[in-house]
C-alpha cells in the first residue's frame, strides 16, 4: 500500500533547520530500506511530504516515531493511505500495480460475460425456464 505523509511544521523555520540534517539522515535510512519513494518540502515552506510504501499504517507510524522532527516536536504528521487507480505511462507499473495506465481503454465485459459473472454470485431466474 502507498501512503502520503504530510508534515506540518509546528515551530519557526530556524528551529526546524536545526534538526534538518538529522531528518535527512532519517529519510536516507528509509530510502535505503525501500520504504520511501519521494520526499520534499512544501512550497511555501510550511512542511513537507513523503510518498512511502508500507504493509500498514502502523508500520508508517512506527517509522515516523523515529523522525528527529517528531522527536524534537517541530512537526506534526498526517498519514493518508492511498490506492492509485490511474497512472501516467511514464510511471512504472511496479509503483502501483493496481493502477491502470491512463488513456488505455480496458475492455468492458460483454453482456453474456457480465451475466455469467453475476450468476456465479447470485443465481438468476430466466423469464421462461427450460422444461425440466
Image (spheres, rainbow, N blue to C red):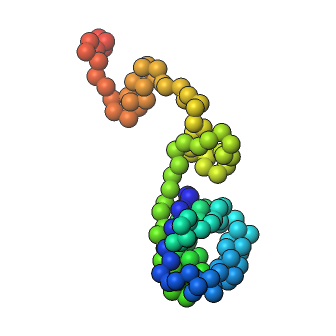
Q: Tell how many labels.
A: 0
**Residue 88: percent from left, percent from top:** 62, 41
- Residue at x 49%, y 60% (from the top left corner): 81
Q: Is residue 32 left or right of residue 107?
A: right
Q: Is residue 2 left or right of residue 127?
A: right
Which quadrant is home to the C terminus? top left
Pick the front one: 3 or 17: 17
Displayed quadrant of residue 69: bottom right
**Residue 105: percent from left, percent from top:** 56, 28
- Residue at x 59%, y 68% (from the top left corner): 41
**Residue 11: percent from left, percent from top:** 50, 84
- Residue at x 66%, y 46% (from the top left corner): 91
Q: Is residue 64 left or right of residue 92?
A: left
- Residue at x 60%, y 49% (from the top left corner): 96
Task: Let me know if residue 27 appears in the view.
Answer: yes
**Residue 57: percent from left, percent from top:** 50, 68
Q: Is residue 22 left or right of residue 3?
A: right
In the picture shown, does residue 100 fall above or below 66?
above
Displayed quadrant of residue 131: top left
Pick the front one: 87 or 60: 87
Amino acid at each position: 500500500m502507498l501512503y502520503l505523509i504530510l508534515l506540518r511544521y509546528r515551530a519557526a523555520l530556524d528551529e526546524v533547520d536545526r534538526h534538518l540534517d538529522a531528518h535527512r539522515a532519517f529519510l536516507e535510512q528509509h530510502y535505503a530500506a525501500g520504504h520511501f519513494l519521494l520526499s520534499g518540502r512544501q512550497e511555501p515552506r510550511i512542511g513537507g511530504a513523503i510518498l512511502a510504501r508500507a504493509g500498514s499504517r502502523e508500520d508508517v507510524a512506527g517509522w515516523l516515531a523515529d523522525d528527529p522532527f517528531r522527536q524534537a516536536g517541530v512537526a506534526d504528521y498526517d498519514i493518508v493511505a492511498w490506492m492509485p487507480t490511474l497512472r501516467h505511462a511514464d510511471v512504472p507499473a511496479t509503483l502501483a500495480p493496481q493502477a491502470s495506465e491512463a488513456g488505455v481503454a480496458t475492455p468492458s465485459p460483454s453482456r453474456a460475460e457480465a451475466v455469467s459473472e453475476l450468476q456465479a454470485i447470485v443465481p438468476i431466474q430466466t423469464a421462461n425456464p427450460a422444461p425440466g
